[in-house]
């Protein structure tokens, strides 16, 4: 990231019981009439709290089935992340667009989301700017990390943070060059003791998390939880945002 060579000297430059009488003491006709009354449908449990960042188990989710998180029409389920000086978020031509801000800009999910055994997939595009156009913040059990795509000046890819080291410094760090106005397919898979990520069809992170300290880079990125998409001094667009559970637990 711009100015990220010195890790700690600069900021990111980068969730009444109804009793129906069966006519026990009435006539058979009365009992029959009571028994034939329609039974009200049982209401579904409310999971999470809309407009609040809750991590939980989406009860409606089917294991293995991709669930859409962005409908291409509205920001339903998302809100602009309140980064200081962040750009606006909107829907344009079916894409979720995050405008360039002074530093971090982005959106975060306001509904329930699984903590483990899931995949999230999306497509991202850098429109203008020279730093990361896609930073996916996501839960790993009770912790959160960020998959950074194109950081530290536009080319660094990796997970922040591992053992308190940024994506530019830890074992997940790689260099990859990105083109403006080109869509890149991003996928993250979270399992017990393992995080994997892909860009297009290339696996770029295969991390054994056993015994490692996972956490977010210090600063405003913690506003992205439980699930967030962010950019740094860059206008970015996103589409086809979806996820699926890998197990029923």
Image (cartoon, helix red, strand yellow):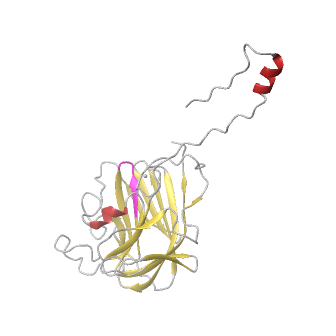
Q: Provide residue 18's location: percent of width, then percent of height.
A: 61, 29
Residues in magenta? 137-142
Q: Is residue 170 left or right of residue 199?
A: left
Left or right: 156 as drawn, with respect to 113 = left
Q: Is residue 151 left or right of residue 183?
A: left
Quadrant location of the N terminus in the rendered image: bottom left
Residue 189 at x, y = what percent?
47, 57
Considering only vertical position in the picture, is 22 above or below 16?
above
Between 135 and 24, which is closer to the camera in this rendering?
Answer: 24
Nearest the eye: 86 or 159: 86
Percent x, y for residue 32?
Answer: 81, 23
Magenta portion: prevailing SS class: strand
The residue positioned 41% from the left and 59% from the top of the image is 138
- Indicate the quadrant where residue 214 lies: bottom left
Relative height, residue 159 to residue 60 (above, below): below
Confirm whether residue 168 shows in the render.
Answer: yes
Is 139 magenta? The answer is yes
- Hey, which residue is sitting farthest right in the picture? 29
The correct choice, above or below, for 141 with respect to 134 in the image is: above
Residue 244 lies in the magenta stretch: no
What residue appears at the point 58 percent right and 67 percent down from the top-left corner?
A: 71
Query: What is the quadrant of residue 156 in the picture?
Result: bottom left
What residue do we see at 38% from left, 85% from top? 129
């Amino acid at each position: 990231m711009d100015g990220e060579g010195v890790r700690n000297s600069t900021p990111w430059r980068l969730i009444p019981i109804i009793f129906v009488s069966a006519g026990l003491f009435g006539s058979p006709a009365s009992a029959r009439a009571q028994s034939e009354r329609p039974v009200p449908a049982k209401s579904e449990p409310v999971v999470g709290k809309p407009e609040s960042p809750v991590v939980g188990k989406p009860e409606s989710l089917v294991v293995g089935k991709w669930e859409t998180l962005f409908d291409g029409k509205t920001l339903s389920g998302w809100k602009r992340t309140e980064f200081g000086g962040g750009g606006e978020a909107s829907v344009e031509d079916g894409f979720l667009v995050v405008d360039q801000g002074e530093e971090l800009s982005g959106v975060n999910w306001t509904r329930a989301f699984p903590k483990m055994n899931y995949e999230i997939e999306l497509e991202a595009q850098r429109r203008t700017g020279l730093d990361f156009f896609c930073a996916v913040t996501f839960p790993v059990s009770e912790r959160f990390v960020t998959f950074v795509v194109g950081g530290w000046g536009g080319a660094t890819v990796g997970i922040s943070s591992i053992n308190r080291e940024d994506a530019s410094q830890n074992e997940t760090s790689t260099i990859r060059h990105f083109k403006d106005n080109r869509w890149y397919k991003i996928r993250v898979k979270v399992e017990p003791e393992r995080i994997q990520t892909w860009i297009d069809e290339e696996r770029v992170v295969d991390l054994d998390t056993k015994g490692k300290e996972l956490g977010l880079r210090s600063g405003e990125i913690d506003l992205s939880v439980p699930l967030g998409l962010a950019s740094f001094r860059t206008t970015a667009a996103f589409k086809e945002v979806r996820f699926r559970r890998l197990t029923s637990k």
